[in-house]
Amino acid sequence: MTSTPRGTEPDLTTRIARDLIRFDTSNFGEGRSNGETEAAEYLAAHLERLGLTVHSFDAAPRRTSIVTRVEGRDRSKPALVVHGHTDVVPAIAEDWSVDPFGGVVADGMLWGRGAVDMKNMDAMIVTALDRILSSGQQPERDLVVAFFADEENGGVFGSHHLVTEHPDLFARATEAISEVGGYSIDLEGKRAYLVQTGEKALIWLKLVARGTAGHGSQINRDNAVTRLAQAVAAIGAREWPMHLTATTRQLLDRVADLLGKDAQVLSPDEIALATGTASRFITATLRTTTNPTGLTAGYKHNVIPDRAEAMIDVRVLPGEEDAVLEEIRAIVGEDIEIVISHRDIGLETTFDGELVDAMVGSLQRHDPGAEVLPYLLSGGTDNKALSLLGIRGFGFAPLQLPPTLDFPAMFHGVDERVPLEALGFGSDVLTDLLLRY
């Protein structure tokens, strides 16, 4: 691994993203977090140096979100929300090649937890604003710039709190851009960009099994661990039926066309797999997924506990939430209690309109001839909360990526990293978009 030579100062985007990674803002869920305050204060200082007034909100101690409004040239136009989050999922340091919170710059990459999810975009937002305002220019329209806490826990102490308690912050805003969109994929040597126009619904479940406690050496047919294990295995093995939304149909048809394949002959799974590494995201949007993600039971090897719990991450296509929950109930049986820890809506919008045209135009000005396609995200973003105010959300964190980089694997993965050139490209495209739209 080759580090950046001494005396070589990273550009502004890399420097901000690096500094943000060095704030360990790990979010463990269910209210347990290292907190986002220091990262929020760091970003606020940058924005204030640009002459902006920054408002800070703490939904709970050390759970800080910040919001500012940038005045545009044409204030008759609706405002655009440009938002990111500053929390990250935890990282186990011994699994990584580098310190996950070291902000290491090496091999032409920025390494660390948050390098792609999503401190890179946070840095690109600030860089774009710095370029615009420092040069005496203004964005085309008012921008509501927000950096939220707690996105990795569904936004309870971040976006949802602000939307519920301070909706006036987003007055006159009708659209939003944020993470997990605008990045490039390789289609057999052809570069295309995916703009996120929707996301699956989120349901986090806890399964609770109860039984009779006893000695580990005895026969126990009322074993909570056994009962839970059977339910978890059944949910994990469930193959949910394929269901293509309008967005996914549009994407797969366009991919097939670009690859010269017949969408009527190939299955949706086969077309999705042809997108290469992007198929990690795309195949998961063809159907519901129900993944067990945690188990808790017992306290000693020779004691059968009377309670066992499991966490299930359910990602549902928009509109199918109630039907999926009903089927999960049938799968686990009446003996298992189902607790909904968090539930949030799915989103899907159309790939049209002035903002879509502007995003496509900005990408193609910096990468002439590139294709730009819509896609549905298998995960979720803070656009869910903003949609409650009628704000139409997109994923647009533009990155031009090398075909060999497994970008979807970087999300919540080990050795998360992003190319420095991609950060520069993203800052250029985002600056272009905010000046023109």
Image (tube, grey):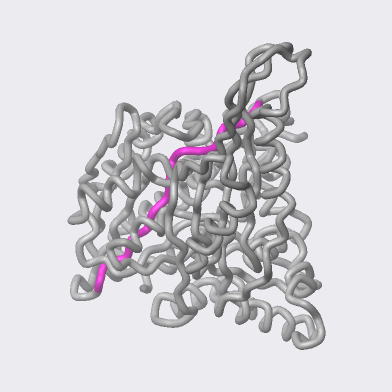
At 51% from the left and 59% from the top, the residue drawn is 397
Does 177 sit left or right of 400 as displayed? left
Foreground residue, 8 or 245? 245
At 34% from the left and 33% from the top, the residue drawn is 63
Does 333 sit left or right of 147 as displayed? right
Q: Which residues are drawn in magenta? A: 78-92
- Quadrant for the C terminus, please: bottom left
Question: Can residue 384 be seen at all in this image of the molecule?
Answer: yes
At 37% from the left and 52% from the top, the residue drawn is 130
Q: Is residue 193 magenta?
A: no
- Quadrant for the N terminus, please: top right
Question: Can residue 102 be seen at all in this image of the molecule?
Answer: no
Question: Residue 393: x percent and y percent?
Answer: 41, 65
Question: Residue 74: x percent and y percent?
Answer: 22, 73
Q: Is residue 79 magenta?
A: yes
Question: Residue 368: x percent and y percent?
Answer: 61, 77
Question: Residue 297: x percent and y percent?
Answer: 63, 24
At 61% from the left and 70% from the top, the residue drawn is 193
